[in-house]
């Protein structure tokens, strides 16, 4: 035998494809093969279809196998069947729209969650759970775009902030919904600007997050207390209060020395009185 091993990557170019209706006539045990409409009829003459799979496995047992139809210059009519494989979820993204609602209990927000694999492809038929402030409000399977939707009509909590979280196969993503009181004349906004969006785990490397408090005219507000909370990559939650300078800015530093690979969710809140201005960002922690 050879004393070395090698890996060969093989790529197919898909020119034509089939659709196999394996339940075309269940009682008669008949399946129907349909060519997609882009085929050239002349090229299909004398075409031969081969079924490949486990020995003595009926081709119509679709719950155990999936079909990968290929046709190219090397395989004239080749239908390949493999064992079913599950697409692994690489990341999940949640979107809250709009991001602010009046605190009247009558308004609605659309919550969208999408999952993708390592190659940035959406994944269908995956179960996603959506939580609002720790309470589950939706469970469902993703569509072909890898998405689920929930039209939510929340009641504003005392904090005037709701945290939405989408979870799928251990991956999670969070989004915030802010509530406002219609009678409040002045609105405030928090802006988070990190010096780095990623730091290395186990390294003495840090990112400086500038926290800016602005009024409705986008003027910085000084001498204001902002509460910063974050959960590190080991699941430990920390909180501190920082004071803005005369320009309306304050800073917080995060260091990767005691972190592992993952992400740190940083939340900033400012209590206006009657409502809360808030914002959040994620800092990635990558391998050192």
Image: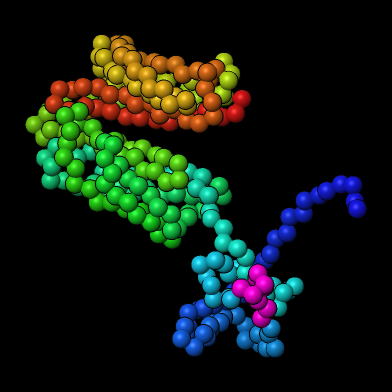
**How does the figure colour the protein chain or chains?**
rainbow
Task: Assess whether residue 54 is covered by the magenta stretch.
Answer: yes
- Give left or right: position of 244 versus 288: left
The vertical placement of 135 against 190, above or below, is below
- Place of residue 220 in the rendered image (x, y in percent of width and height, measured from the top left): 28, 19
Residue 38 seen: no
Which one is in front, 98 or 217?
98
- Place of residue 276 in the rendered image (x, y in percent of width and height, measured from the top left): 21, 27
Q: Residue at x 31, y 14 (%)?
A: 241
Q: Quadrant of residue 243?
A: top left
Task: Assess whether residue 30 is covered by the magenta stretch.
Answer: no
In the rendered image, the residue lying farthest to the left is 183
Which one is in front, 42 or 82?
82
Q: How many marks?
A: 0
Which residue range is magenta in the image?
49-57
The vertical placement of 222 against 264, above or below, is above
Q: Residue at x 75, y 73 (%)?
A: 74
The vertical placement of 74 against 284, above or below, is below
Residue 63 seen: yes
Q: Quadrant of residue 223?
A: top left
In the rendered image, the residue lying farthest to the front is 56
Chief SS of the magenta region: loop
- Give left or right: position of 116 versus 8: left
Q: Residue at x 66, y 81 (%)?
A: 49
- Place of residue 18 in the rendered image (x, y in percent of width and height, measured from the top left): 58, 76
- Place of residue 143 in the rendered image (x, y in percent of width and height, measured from the top left): 40, 59
Tell me the quarter of the image containing the C terminus.
top right
Q: Residue at x 20, y 28 (%)?
A: 159
Which one is in front, 247 or 138?
138
């Amino acid at each position: 035998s050879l004393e070395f091993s090698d890996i060969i990557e093989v790529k197919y170019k898909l020119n034509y494809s089939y659709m196999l209706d394996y339940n075309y006539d269940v009682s008669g045990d008949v399946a129907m093969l349909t060519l997609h409409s882009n085929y050239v009829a002349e090229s299909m003459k004398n075409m031969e279809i081969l079924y490949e799979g486990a020995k003595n496995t009926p081709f119509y047992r679709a719950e155990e196998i999936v079909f990968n139809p290929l046709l190219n210059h090397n395989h004239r009519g080749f239908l390949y069947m493999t064992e079913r494989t599950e697409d692994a979820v690489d990341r999940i993204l949640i979107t809250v729209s709009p991001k602010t609602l009046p605190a009247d209990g009558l308004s609605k927000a659309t919550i969208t969650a999408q999952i993708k694999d390592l190659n940035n492809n959406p994944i269908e038929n995956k179960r996603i759970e959506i939580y609002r402030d720790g309470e589950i409000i939706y469970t469902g399977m993703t569509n072909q775009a890898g998405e689920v939707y929930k039209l939510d009509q929340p009641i504003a909590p005392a904090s005037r902030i709701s945290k939405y979280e989408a979870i799928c196969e251990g991956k999670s993503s969070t989004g915030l919904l802010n509530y406002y009181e219609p009678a409040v004349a002045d609105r405030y906004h928090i802006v988070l600007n990190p010096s780095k969006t990623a730091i290395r785990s186990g390294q003495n490397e840090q990112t400086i997050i500038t926290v800016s408090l602005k009024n409705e005219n986008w003027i910085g507000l000084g001498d204001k207390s902002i509460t910063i909370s974050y959960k590190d990559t080991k699941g430990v939650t920390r909180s501190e209060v920082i004071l803005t300078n005369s320009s309306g800015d304050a800073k917080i530093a995060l260091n990767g020395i005691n972190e592992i690979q993952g992400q740190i969710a940083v939340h900033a809140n400012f209590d206006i009185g009657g409502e809360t201005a808030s914002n959040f960002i994620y800092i990635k922690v990558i391998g050192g």
